[in-house]
Image: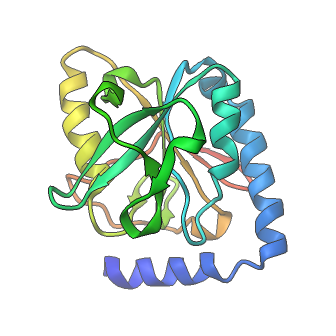
Amino acid sequence: MKRRLRAKLLKKRDSIPPEQKVLKEAEIEKSLFALDAFKKAGSLLLYVSFRSEVDTTRYLNNVIKLGKKLILPVVDSRHKELKLYKVRDTSELVPGYMGIHEPGVGENRRATLKDIDLVIIPGTGFDVKGNRLGYGGGYYDKLLGFESRQLAKADHHIMTIALAFEEQIGEEIPAEPHDIKVDIIITDKRLIYC
């Protein structure tokens, strides 16, 4: 069921005409940068977009220019997990897993969710309850599930935000107990508080 829904939502996202996509992305960016949680965050985990995802590449330098600590994931496909690294400049990014640009790895740059005030994550689809359909690898569910259990002990909640086109919002996304929900979804049409 998830596989069919994922394919359907990806097809919808892929079919957004380029000129509309640029306008939609501008609305999403404006909403993200105006959000109180974004303004207050001193550090954030962002992702580098690929394929037809909401383009985040232009945000990266802006985040750094605003004086925020930028943290990006590196896919460790062998262990099926995301490792987090601090980025000082986007010139440090190199092609990684599936050609997605990632930070060059260095132990002195490692980060954990304890270093992060705000998490911005991708996905193929979402519903208004905050359920998220990823790409099927479980990378973000694993990262946020494990880290959330660790952080819960310290009574620390990290807000999670998804960036999506309105076309990616479905009536109901099937969720399993290990699936991580998002707190806010920012689309080109609205803010959805979950």
**Which residue does the image show at 52% across and 78% down from the upper left?**
10
Can residue 170 be seen in the rendering of this structure? yes
With 64 as the anchor, is 174 left or right in this view?
left
Residue nearer the viewer, 15 or 130? 15
Front in this rendered view, residue 183 or 154: 154
Q: Where residue 54 sits: x, y (%)?
A: 63, 59
Residue 143 image position (x, y, % from top left): 26, 43
Q: Is residue 146 left or right of 188 when viewed as pictured?
A: left
Residue 112 position within the rendered picture, expressed as x and y whole percent measured from the top left: 30, 29
- When the figure is inspected, residue 56 is found, relative to residue 59, above or below; the finding is below
Q: Quadrant of residue 24?
A: bottom right
Residue 76 figure quarter: bottom left
The residue at the point 72 percent across, 50 percent down is 28
The x and y percentages for residue 9 are 52, 77
**Residue extending farthest left:** 79
Can residue 129 be seen here?
Answer: no
In the displayed structure, 44 sits above or below 8; it is above
Image quarter where the N terminus lies is: bottom left
